[in-house]
Image: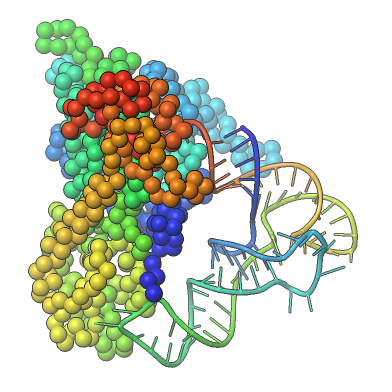
Amino acid sequence: MAKTGITPTREQDYPEWYQQVIKAADMAENSDVRGCMVIKPWGYGIWENMQSVLDRRFKQTGHENAYFPLFIPKHFLEKEAEHVEGFAKECAVVTHHRLEPGPEGGLVPAGELEEPLIVRPTSETIIGSMFAKWIQSYRDLPLKINQWCNVVRWEMRPRIFLRTAEFLWQEGHTAHATQEEAMDETKMMLDVYADFAENHMALPVVRGEKTAGERFPGADMTLTIEAMMQDRKALQAGTSHFLGQNFSKAQEIKFHDQDGTESHAWTTSWGLSTRMVGALIMAHGDDDGLIVPPRLAPKHIVILPIYRNDEERSKVLDYCNSLKSELDQLEYSRRELQVLLDDRDLRGGEKKWHHIKKGVPIRVEVGPRDLESGSVFVGRRDQAKSSSVSRDEFVGTVLQILDEIQQTLFDRALKLREDNTHSFTTLDEFKEFFTPVNPSKPEIHGGFAVCHFVDTPEVEEMLKPLKVTARCMPLEDNEEKGTCIFTGQPADRKAIFAKAY
RNA sequence: CGGGGUGUAGCGCAGUCUGGCUAGCGCACCUGCUUUGGGAGCAGGGGGUCGAAGGUUCGAAUCCUUUCACCCCGACCA
């Protein structure tokens, strides 16, 4: 009988499968605060590894970390018109600074603030206000700052990791003397994200430009990396914004050039959030649970000792400990190899499934028979079968196995995307692609549709009933001119359309 | 903010229509024995006063009133 680790399967009920994977892998859970999640050690460990890879890349590309306040004075947010409009509907507002005993017990807010404070939904305004002070001369530029923090966007429909009221992210903010330099920065950081997604998350992405309707509020241009999840929906995995002089004009970020003229700086911002953990789950998980790409795994290998009595136990544990020390010497992807020896007093099968559901890349089972033959029983999370190999061979090839798993995950995800990306030249074909056979209980359908189009509000309107959005206009391979399948007008380039998270 | 629904043990639920012994069941948890290369079996055990407040009644998880919370479907969104 093929019993799966997760009920239901992806095919049966994808959204429910997603929730169950998180629960089974013990990654996170909902908290008592609606819309806010608690990230548990296994989920947080993955995020920490994401942080460490990205942080290194940010520093390599000339950025420094700093920290800015959680609270933003209301009038800061009001300065940039589009920015206000984009975020006003989802801001948490702090109006008081004290609690006092209420008439009927409990506590009531007191000490009303002169000006309400907004819990940051993003920090362009408060960082910009500091940039305005720090920047006076062309010699102060470029200024390239990143911060790791939490932000709050009051969401009505939370989904753990994908959309929560509070989430963790990094936000980079830079200021430059010229438009070209700011544009180069915007593109470079998109490439950093794309490289991270593909080489560390094993997640193939399309690099593209957002349409006017999907752009960041206040940006002149938003670049994005878009990935396909296993239900064929798109997920925006990271964005990089060219802000032009919009914020610098609103916030007076000015500098004197070499010839003494005063100009407004050109700014960018770019962010990537804990949403990526959700992307990782939906891109790689299977019906037995999570699969963590080795390069981001909190534990690469779990050793499971198998024994029947105390005598066997001590022998097996000695063998396991020495194996662990040997493996501990190795490094994988700039980290020490992380090896867990799980000697909890649990039945073997239960313990094994526990680690399968968590997605540990490699399981090593060690029992009395292995001691005699000097071997280990190795199972890879990307394969169903396990096999016996000599201990020395295993230690000698383990790093290679991890790379193979990493590659397998990437190849699988790429194949999924390629198999479900189609070009369309007529609107009828397009509509059919996005219409489920059974509308009351939609099956997994659709994918990425690539079509010529013109970026106008009418097109966005036409897409609404289908619940499809323009994900991006790909940066690569997008020179060919054609006809917009929505309006019939001549179109300069194509866009990718999909249902999205 | 509109429509629908649910609150009973850590989790998932039955019981509510038709009020009545000490409020049940499954999973999880603890103990013991048997098992052990694979998500164990048997036996025993701990844990809830039924979202909250008020009312009707000899008697309320169950009926009535008020209230709170959460979930799902729509509009919004990294």
Front-lying residue, A314 or A485 = A485
Residue A340 at least partly seen: no
> What x and y, as percent, mark residue A112?
55, 27
* Left or right: residue A23 compared with residue A314: right
Quadrant of res A65? top left
Quadrant of res B15? bottom right
Count all numbered tags in the image, as a single digit.
Answer: 0
* Left or right: residue A326 compared with residue A459: left
Q: Quadrant of the N terminus of chain A?
A: bottom left
* On screen, residue A64 above or below A246: below
* On screen, residue B9 above or below B24: above
Q: Quadrant of the C terminus of chain A?
A: top left
Question: What residue appears at the point 33 percent right and 15 percent down from the top-left corner?
Answer: A250
> What x and y, as percent, mark residue A499?
38, 39
Quadrant of res A473? top left
* On screen, residue A273 above or below A341: above
